[in-house]
Amino acid sequence: MGAWSSGRARRGYSALTVPTGLMVLVAPLIAAFSAPVAEATGALATESKRAQMAEPLRTSAAEPVQTSATEPSRASAAEPVQTSATGPLRASAAESVQTSAIGPLRASAAESVQTFATGALRASATEPAHAPATVGASSAEPTRTAAATPIRARVRSGALVGTVDNGIETFKGVPYAAPPVGPLQWALPQPPNSWAGERVADDFGPSCMQRSPPHNVPAGTRAAQLSEDCLTLNIWAPQASRKAPVMVWIHGGGNQTGSAADIYYDGAAFARDGVVLVSVNYRLGALGFQVHNGNANFGLWDQVAALKWVRNNIAVFGGDPDNVTLFGESAGGQDTLALLTAKPARGLFNKAIVESGGGGWQQLSPLAGAQQDPEGDWNLVSDGHLLEESPLVAIGAGRMAHVPLIIGTNDQEGSLLDQGASTAELFPKLSDDDLTKLRAQYGVQASDDAALVRLLFRDVFFASEARWVAAKVSEAGSPAYLYRFQYVLSALQARRTGAHHGSEIPFVFGRLPPLRVDDADVRVEHAMHASWIAFARTGRPASVEFPGWTPFGARHRWMVFDSHPSVRPIEGVAALDLLQCRLATDFPLVEGACD
């Protein structure tokens, strides 16, 4: 979810900034596909239907799972340290190297295949995605395979031993900053400590501290544990690649919860298709966003540190440091928007993708006015350093990185709302006359008050803001591409009418369950994944299958991902205009919005 908080949020969940008396909870990030996964049995396997439609996309037979974070790093004099097969290593003294405090790592190069355990994922769309979980009760149970072999790489901090399998190199739990513990607990991230010998990188690092363990991380891995020592990243790379495009993923969860080790963030499909995928852990909640001694936004600073690490080390893994796409969903999308405007992040990425990163036209609190409740849901503030002003203010004035952008939303973002949500509490600035006009503009979609409030929530917090950002980026001279995701997995279509918040993620990552998918499921997955790949390569999401996805500024159209993805005129323009005119009064309006 985006960067919002509420005094009435349930502990462990993020919530929106809404009037007192209304609680708006984050719903499952994978709600739109969790039911069929829970009903499916068996391991992730070769998906012939997908392979036939998506050639030259290939499937991976196995994926590495790494070792415990509580052991010291292994130093061996018997085996020489070697460089990665992915290409030449860069040497630079620009970034200091430091030692790791994550602990001993086992020397085994064994790799595990993640399986979907029946019943592990929730079938209910109303159960929060980040509810308390028992460590080990995961949707992905590791099983051993002898297929993976060790592969070595040297980064600035030391030597790593990852795994290679089916043409995909994987390095997990790689420190990109010093452990933020002790005197570094509330401090800006420092360069990673160096280590002696080899560090086995075949297991995720621990998840960052949050109120309960995150769902959907592989049981038996370090990611099922919580630790303050969590600033690690994971890399999936095509074997022996050279100057491959790089994509850096920022997970969602309201900046309160989540983990880069979520099984739906697995980067194998990207690596299979020639992209180096990096997923990042960053500090969450109070440890990541509480104001402390005049500093703030520590979790966002962590993301900057990860991007610096990528710039200085990714060539070792065959990635191109001059072709980096930053992308994220929900809070990860909002953080991506924020980093577009952050001067310390300039030059660290060349393209950006924002998935459902709306904020409801909210201005960030200034540092001096930030909440001081240590039990609250902390989030981004205007700190005068990383974020000199609210990101939307900066974007409206053109004070941002001028890079290509994809931005979009899902058609049922209102799945985040609590059952008791009302228009009066959420949108007090809308008059009765406004609501009458909006009901007429939405037509049969607004069949009752509950349907109306969900439509308004989607368009106020997500769609109108996404359209506005696309317009402002275009006006500033960079290409912006707008989309709407509204596809429902075939197995869910009997009981779900639209795409819930976060339901695009498995389509983006090529992570649909291999069972109970039909041709349309595979077609939409391929369309979205291929568009993201094309954008990472060239800055244009147009592909052979979808050549018509033109920049927003050219024709004010968007790509609609439904059962037959295509570029179409934007729907609901009158409602978007009215909502922006009434609620976005602090920002420059899209031309004609209030005519």
Image (cartoon, grey):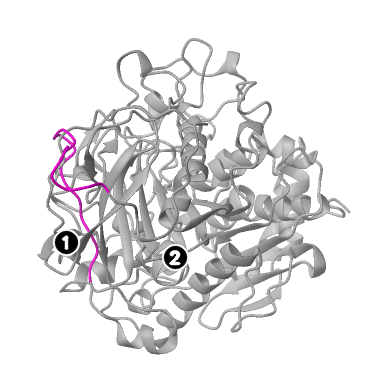
Q: Is residue 320 magenta?
A: no
Residue that carries the numbered disc 2 in the rendered image: 241
Q: Residue 234: horizontal and vertical position, in percent?
A: 35, 49
Mark 2: which amino acid?
Ser
User: Which one is nearer the viewer's eye here, 136 or 572?
Assistant: 136
Q: Secondary structure at mark 2?
A: loop
Instruction: Say if 246 sits above or below 372 in the image.
Output: below
For the question of whether residue 16 can be seen, the reply is no
Mark 1: which amino acid?
Ser
User: Which one is nearer the viewer's eye here, 19 or 562?
Assistant: 562
Residue at x 37% of width, y 66% of height? 239
Magenta residues (range): 62-81
Quote the CA–CA distance across marks 1 and 2: 23 Å
Give the quadrant of residue 196.
top left
> Neighbour class for label 2 at 10 Å: few (<14), some, many (≥20)?
many
User: N-terminal of the two: label 1 or label 2?
Assistant: 1
Residue that carries the numbered disc 1 in the rendered image: 112
Instruction: Say if 120 sits above or below 82 in the image.
Output: below
> Neighbour class for label 1 at 10 Å: few (<14), some, many (≥20)?
many
Q: Is residue 290 left or right of residue 578?
A: left
- Foreground disc of the pair 1, 2: 2
Q: Secondary structure at mark 1?
A: strand
Residue at x 48% of width, y 46% of height? 90
User: Which one is nearer the viewer's eye here, 481 or 438?
Assistant: 481
Residue at x 53% of width, y 46% of height? 422
Q: Quadrant of the C terminus?
A: bottom right
Chief secondary structure of the magenta span? Answer: loop
Give the quadrant of residue 547.
bottom right
